[in-house]
Image: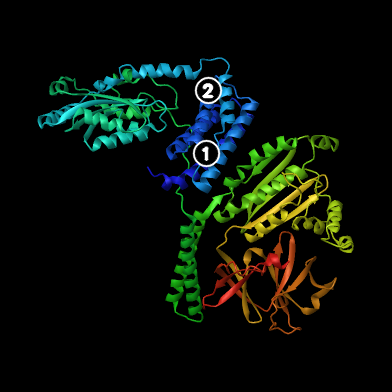
Amino acid sequence: MDVSQYLEIFLDETKEHLQSLNTEILNLEQDPENTDTINEIFRAAHSLKGMAGTMGYKRMQNLTHDMENVFSEVRNGTIKVKGNMIDILFQCLDALEEYLNNIQETSDEGTNENEPLIKMLNDVLDSKEGGEPQKEKKPQAKAEAAEGSGSKWKDIKFDDTQKRVLSEAVDQGKKVYGITVKVQESCILKAARAFLVFKALEELGEVLISNPSVQDIEDERFELDFSLIFVSDSSLEKVLDAIKGVSEIEGTQGALIENEQIGSVTAIEASQNAVPAAVPEEGENAPAAEKANQPTPVSKAVEKKAPVSKPVVNRTVRVDIEKLDVLMNLVSELIIAKNSLVSASVGDRNNSVNEHIEYLESVTTNLHESVMKVRMVPIESVVNKFPRMIRDLSKKLDKKMELYMSGEETELDRTVVDEIGDPLMHLLRNAADHGLESGAVRKSKGKPEVGSIFLDAYQDGNNVVIEVRDDGAGINTAAVKEKAIMKGVITPDQGENMSDQEIINLLFNAGFSTSEVVSDVSGRGVGLDVVKSKIESLSGEVEVKSKIDVGSTWTIRLPLTLAIIQALMVDVGGEKYAISLGSIQTIEDIIPSDIKTVQNKEVIHLRGIVIPLIRLSEVLDIASKKNSEDNMTVVIVKKGDRLSGIVVDELMGQQEIVIKSLGKYITKCKMISGATILGDGEVALILDTNALF
C-alpha cells in the first residue's frame, strides 16, 4: 500500500498531537490527579501510535505504544504521576519530534531505536504500586474471547425478510456461510483490517448481515472478533483463505448454513440492533450476549452511548497556501479592474457607471475580506510551544521562572505566523537567560524569587502587536556603550552624545553581545540582528524599552495583511508614491517660516511636539515641483512612539491598493516595500515609512 500520498496529512496531524501532548503533560505536572488531562494524553498517544503504524514507522509506533501503556496504568490508578516520570515523557516527546523531523526531510524515521527511553518507560511500568497489573489481565481477556469465538456467528438472529432472502439464495444454488473472524490483539487499526476482510469477501459474494453492525465495526466498536452471514458460490475453504490473506487476522472459522437452520431460527430484532461488545476507551460495558437479549430499539441504544467529553471544534479544511495565493491574485486583478473603472468614470456623469463601480467595490471588498479570513490563523500555533521551552530553560539555568501568555487567539496572516516563531523564541530565551536574575539576586533586590516573563499579543488598528516583557535586571546601558566602543561600533565621542534609548538600539547590530560568556541558550544581542531583519522582512518593526531593575519590554509590530492595504497616494516631482494609511498620524499644511533647525536637521514644532522633517524629493533624488517659498504639505507618520514629517509635493487621495513584490533582485532599497498598479496602468512605488526614520 502506497502511503506517501498521506504524508502531508500525517505530518500535520502528528505536529498537532505532539503540541497537544506538550501542553497536556505541562498541565499534568501542575495537577497530577486530573483525569481529563490523563485521558487526553492517552488519546493523543493512542492516535499517534495508530498513525505511525499505518504509515509503517515502526520505531515511532513502538515508542508511542509504550507511552500509551504507561498512561493506561495511570488511568487505572495503578501508577502515580511523579516528577521523574514527567521528565521521561518530555524526553519521549523530543524523540518523537526527532522522528518527525527525519520523516519531514527524508520520508524515513531514521535508525534511532530510543532503547534507553523505552527501558525507562518499562521501568515506570514495573515500579507501579498496588492494583492488579493490566498486563496480567490481558491474557485472561484473550482466553475469554477465544472461548467459543469460532461459533459466535450462531448468535446472529434473522428477521423474516432476512430469512426469505437467505432461503431464496439457497434455492438458487448459492451457499450461505456463517463466519467469525478474529483479529490479533496487537492490531492497531481493527476497523481497517475489518474493512479489508469485507473487501476480500465482496469479490467472492455478498455480506448480508454482520454482528456488530457495519457502522459499529467502522467506528471500532468491537473487541477482537466480528461475525458475518455471507452468501457466495465459492467453497468454504476459498472464502476462509481470502480472509486469512488479510494481515493481522489471528484466525477465522465458518460453516455452511442449511436451509432448515435458516427457517428454524426464531424471528427477533435484526442483528443490526445488537449492542457492540465494548466501546473502546470509555468505561466498561456489560457483555454483548447479555445486552442482545434486551429488545432495545435502535434510537435508545444510541441515546445510551457515553457522552463525548471533548467539545466539538470548528470543522476545518486544510488548504494549500499556494491555492490561496492564486485566489488572492484574482482578487488583486479585480481591484485593479475596479481602479480602471474609477479612472474611466472621472468626470463622467453617467450614473449607471457609478452604480457598477459601487457594486464592484462592494464585491471586491467582501471577496478580499473572506480570502483574508481564510488566510488568517491564530498565533496560538506558534506560542503553544513556549511554556515547555521556559520549563526546560528554568531547569537548565537553575532559575525559577513563570511564563504568562495572553492574546493567543489574535489572528495573523498565515505567512507571518510561519515566520514569527524563531524571533519570538530568541526574545524569550534572552529574557530567561539575561533578563531574569538568579533567585538569590532577586531576593536581595526585594523581588519575588520566581521571575516572570510575559508574552502578550493584541490587535492595534491595522497592526498586530506582540510584546515580550520580563521583570528582570533591565539592560545596563553603560555596559552596552563600553562594549560598543570596544568593538568599534561607535566612537567614544559618539557614545557621549547618545541617549540611553539609542545605546539600547545598538543591541540590534550584527554579532553584538554584552554577555561575557555566550551560552548555548542565548547572549543578549546574539540573534537580535536576525530578529530585526526577520521582522522587517515581514514589513514589521521591533523596538525595545528597558529600565534598570524593573525589566525590559520588546515590542514587535506586524501588519495584519501583506496583500492589500488602504493607502494615501502622493505626488513627488511628478512621480506617484503610496504611503500606508496605517502609519499616517495626520496631514499638515506648513509655512516655510515654521521650519527650525536642530543639530543641522530640519524640524517643525507641532502642538507641543518637535517633529523631524524628511523631504522625500531629497531622499528619492527627485526635483521637487514646488518653490521654496510655497506652503508645504507634510504627512506626519508614526513608528511606535516616534513621529516624523514627510514633505510631499501634492496629495492625490486615498485608494485601496494591491501590493506587488518587486522580486528578490530589487531588495537593496529598504525604503521601497513594493509596488502597485494604478487604474490607468501606471506603476506606483509603495514607501516603507519605517525605513525613512
Instruction: Tell me, yes or no, if residue 40 can be seen here.
Output: no
Numbered circle sitting on residue 73: 2
Decide which of 71, 39 is in the foreground and name it. 71
At x 16%, y 21%, the residue is 261
Decide which of 204, 161 is in the foreground and name it. 204
Q: Left or right: 104 with respect to 303?
A: right
Q: Left or right: 348 with respect to 515?
A: left
User: Which callout, 2 or 1, points at the residue further toward the start of the chain?
Assistant: 1
Q: Please tell me whether residue 139 is drawn above or below residue 588 in the rendered image.
A: above
Local SS, label 2: helix
At x 60%, y 24%, the residue is 81
Q: Left or right: 13 with respect to 654?
A: left
Image location (x, y in percent) of residue 266: 19, 20
Image location (x, y in percent) of residue 5: 41, 48
Q: Residue lying farthest left?
A: 171
Amino acid bearing label 2: Glu
Image location (x, y in percent) of residue 132: 51, 15
Marks 2 and 1, Cα distance to the nearest angstrom?
A: 20 Å
Decide which of 662, 242 is in the foreground and name it. 242
Asked if labels 1 and 2 touch by Cβ distance under 8 angstroms, the answer is no
Image location (x, y in percent) of residue 347: 51, 82
Q: Left or right: 471 with respect to 148?
A: right
Q: Which quadrant is home to the N terminus? A: top left
At x 47%, y 75%, the residue is 341
Instruction: Tell me, yes or no, if residue 68 can be seen here.
Output: yes
Amino acid bearing label 1: His
Local SS, label 1: helix
Model colouring: rainbow
Q: Which residue is mark 1?
A: 17
Q: Which quadrant is home to the C terminus? A: bottom right
